[in-house]
Amino acid sequence: MTHSWRIYTDMDGTLLDHHDYHWDAAKPVLQRCEVERIPVIPNTSKTAAELLQWFPRLGLPTFAVVENGGMVLLPKNHEWWRTHRADWSEGEVAGKLLGRPYMDICAWLDAVRLAEGFYCQGFHDVDVDTVVAWTGLSPEEAHQAKQRQCSEPILWEGDADALKRLMRAAQAEGLQLQQGGRFLHLSDNTNKATGMAWLEAILPGKGVTIALGDGGNDVPMLEAADFAVAVRNAQGTHVAIQQPQTYFTKQAGPAGWAEGLVYWLNLEE
Ligand SMILES: [Mg+2]
């Protein structure tokens, strides 16, 4: 192996199947990464509480970027915490906020929605059962998805013109709306590339990064990585990106994840 690879990966629709959240097709390549000590770092719109469940399931070390770049997670015993205070922690994992806190973001959404008459619902508006219906998550997983620190998934029920107005209002506030697989994500001006850059700055040595994703919110990460994998999405297309080192997968979901990652890992310098 000629590279010191580091893998940053989207979860839903990329490492996990868009419909059933399975990852069987990715297992052999995940095992290869473990054997070759290549860190696989989730970079996701999921929450820290959700990731705590996924680390052991996927056999991954507890590094991650969550909520679309709004927070980074490190093991609690990582040396960085000797000189810095955590904004969130549970079990053996601690988190550092890179974006504005959740309460501020929801308060802004409530105010602008009332003032402008926008039709939309966020996770903070609804109960666990509704999140189950929206996502297909189990009640337990939906509960974890509602434990948010810095971003709000929004189900848009208005028209395209109103959505443009919401986007302009968010921009004026220093917030942003990003399109994910199912939801719009309202957050501070952080994104998956912000989180990846933050981790790259504190991880040892110079890594060569491979990023994998299937959605619009993955584009900054895919473009900032040394190598990118655009995984075929649920609609059968790929994201449009300005990144010459991109492999576009033939397969979708975890099969595409494995296909694209093997393509770059097998590339000799
Ligand atoms: Mg995705």
Image (cartoon, rainbow, N blue to C red):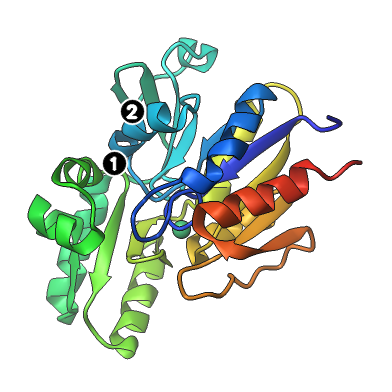
Report x, y in % for residue 152. 28, 56
Report x, y in % for residue 75. 45, 19
Residue found at x 16% / y 66% = 111
Q: Residues within 10 Å of mark 1 (few under 14, many from 20)?
A: many
Residue found at x 78% / y 58% = 245
> How many marks on residues?
2
Residue 224 seen by the camera: no
Query: Which numbered disc, 2 or 1, marks the residue that appears first in the sequence?
Result: 2
Task: Give residue 32's quadrant in the image.
Answer: top right
Pointer 2 and pointer 1: residues touching (CB < 8 Å)? yes
Amino acid type shown at disc 2: Asp
Residue 133 seen by the camera: yes
Task: Give residue 6's quadrant in the image.
Answer: top right
Report x, y in % for residue 50. 30, 38
Which residue lies under the disc numbered 1? 149
Residue found at x 33% / y 60% = 186
Which residue lies under the disc numbered 2? 87
Position of the C terminus by quadrant: top right
**SS state under label 2:** loop
- The residues tagged by marks 2 and 1 sit, at their Cα atoms, a distance apart of 9 Å
